[in-house]
Image: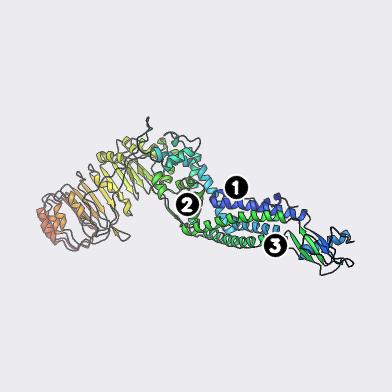
Amino acid sequence: MIFLTDLTVFSSQNPALRILKPWWDVISDYLNIIMLMMSVFAASLQVSFEKMICIPVPPGLSVTDNVWNVTPMNKPDTVVMITGFKTQLDLQYYGLINQWCYDNAILTYSKFFPYLILTNSMIFFISSNFWFKFPGTSSKIEHFIAVLGKCLDSPWTTRALSETVFEEPEYYYEPASSSSISPTSSIPSSTTLVIESKTEHVVPTLPPEGPVEEPSLASKLTKKLPGTSLDRTSGKILDKREGEQAKALFEKVKMFRVHTEEKDILYQMYKRQTILRALETVVFLSYVAVYTPRMRYAVHCTDSLNITGFIDYYCIHGLWRMYSMLSIGYLFALSIYCCTCFYTVYWLFYVKLKEYSFEATRRESGISDIPDVVNDFAFLLHLIDQYDTLYSWKFAVFLSDVSETKLLQVNLNHYWTTEKLRQCLTINSEGKTELRLFMIPCIPSQVFEVNEIEVLKLEFIRSPTISSTITHLRSLKELCLHNCNVKMESQALMFLKKTLLVLRVHYSSAPELPSWLYQMWKLQELYLKGRLQIDKVTINFHSLRGLKELKTLYLQLSMGKLPSAMLDVAGTLSQLTIHNEGARFHSLSSLKKFYSLTHLRLLDCKLDRIPSSIFSLTNMKEIDLTNNNLISLEELASCQHLKKLSCLKLSENRITSIPSIIEKISTITTLQTSDSSFG
């Protein structure tokens, strides 16, 4: 006797794998269980009941007629009805003949029907679950299930959702090609402030008129998370331990993405086993449909061994009726199984399963930076979409850099308390209270609560966001950005427009040069350090017309000529410093338009002579031409027109002699050449 419990070892698997089974695979599994039960039942009948019952037929009797007729020797005209006869055979003879006829006269399909359908069912089961057991795929699947389970259970999923639904801050976004455009592109005269509208979630007291909008994906998810409160304050509750766990989970998701996007072994294995199942189903369905009608209840058996004295036997297959019904039921289940297999093949080749787009998720959830994925990662997400589309959204939370930045913000807030930040305050050389944040993921929220800050330095911060709470820093006058791509909320921008006096920007990529700097109309000093040619892309400055009170401009940019945007502040600048990092200036004729300059520094510009345009700047008090290629100073005769010039610095040049004309410039009180000083 074969029991169904004996086969449970083949069907046991991790219950968590059900999320990777689409509805057609679930139907296939149930059909496979039904077919497996049929085969077990048929096999149990095969070993439990008599397979064949045979009786010998005397010579002269027909095995096909219902009445056996024989004509006696002495009465040829008389028909005698035979209702029975004596064979004088022992029981052992009947057992022998039954087995002989079962082996030789019965249809092979009828004899091995239980084992055939049992074998078919086991092949179906193995082929449909092979990718869960194969070492090359099972490790990825188990890893994916483990990571996804942690993503679903992580409190950060709820936190990110709460911020998405309820906290939609207004940001200042840079216009297209604000800092990185080609040389042939047109340069707009001014930047445009774009403010994202803030969505208010209000529960109406009366039903709205007209069609009701379908709730967003984020709001759907909130309803599906039992015990989750959507209060604004509840979303902010995340202790230090949970924050560290979520941070580690971000790293796991990133590593898993890199690992699974390299190849498509999961997709290929699933496709091959599906095609194999479809071919197997066609073959099994063909022979079951062909041989089922050939099964017979009564058969004629001939004893070629002649061991009993009888040649013909009339035999009955006792399990024929049950086998026929099981065969028809198996044929029906197999037909449905075949349909699911071909639907799976259609799904594999019709849908682009090696590409997965989060476009709908980005649009409905508000997390705009979720990247699209490819290969095995995309295939796994397509599978869990068939189980529950919300699972991919929960997973997407840990693919977003914005979400990770918010998490890092929360973790930083646990570490960088207001008291600790105050301990980091220093007094710089100018006597100002300074806070320097170096190589941290983002700006801690508590920074904007330290109202003593006058100078805020942000260096090598990956995703800094200046929030509206910066309005608490009433003493803030100077902002330094060193390799930081700063994102600023609109309220923060409006505040800095009115209070910021000094801005220092050191950039190494185009996005690090913020476009909002052109809106700082109270700015008095601007320091820019970087390059105008980065990765074969030319950076062009917007108009500086908005910097109405700019007095000091420092450029360390390695340029060939003065940017045209500087001409917008030519009438207001009093100090201009250009450090050209060894690049040669081709033209400085536009300097004559800076008629308000009092201090001019042209450093490391490879100048061979003093530019003549300088001598038209009648307000000039100091000229610094340090570290150039000056040889002669014949142009100094024109300095007589600069009545206010008092300091001339010519150090680190190739000057061999100083002309006597310098003595006629009575206003010069300081002259520096190399290591010499004249006063």
For the residues marked 2 and 1, what is the alpha-carbon distance in whole angstroms?
25 Å
For the residues marked 2 and 3, what is the alpha-carbon distance in whole angstroms?
55 Å
The three-letter amino acid code for the residue at tag 3 is: Tyr
Q: Earlier in the sequence, mark 1 or mark 3?
A: 1
Q: Where is residue 25 shown, x and y percent of the image?
A: 56, 52
Q: Which residue is mark 3?
A: 109
Q: Nearer the viewer, residue 511 or 276?
A: 276
The three-letter amino acid code for the residue at tag 1 is: Pro
Res. 563 in view: yes
* Mark linked to residue 62: none
Q: Secondary structure at mark 1?
A: helix
Q: Nearer the viewer, residue 213 or 19?
A: 213
* Mark linked to residue 15: 1
Can you tell which of label 1 and label 3 is closer to the viewer?
Answer: 3
Q: Where is residue 269 shown, x and y percent of the image?
A: 55, 60
Q: Secondary structure at mark 3?
A: helix
Q: Earlier in the sequence, mark 2 or mark 3?
A: 3
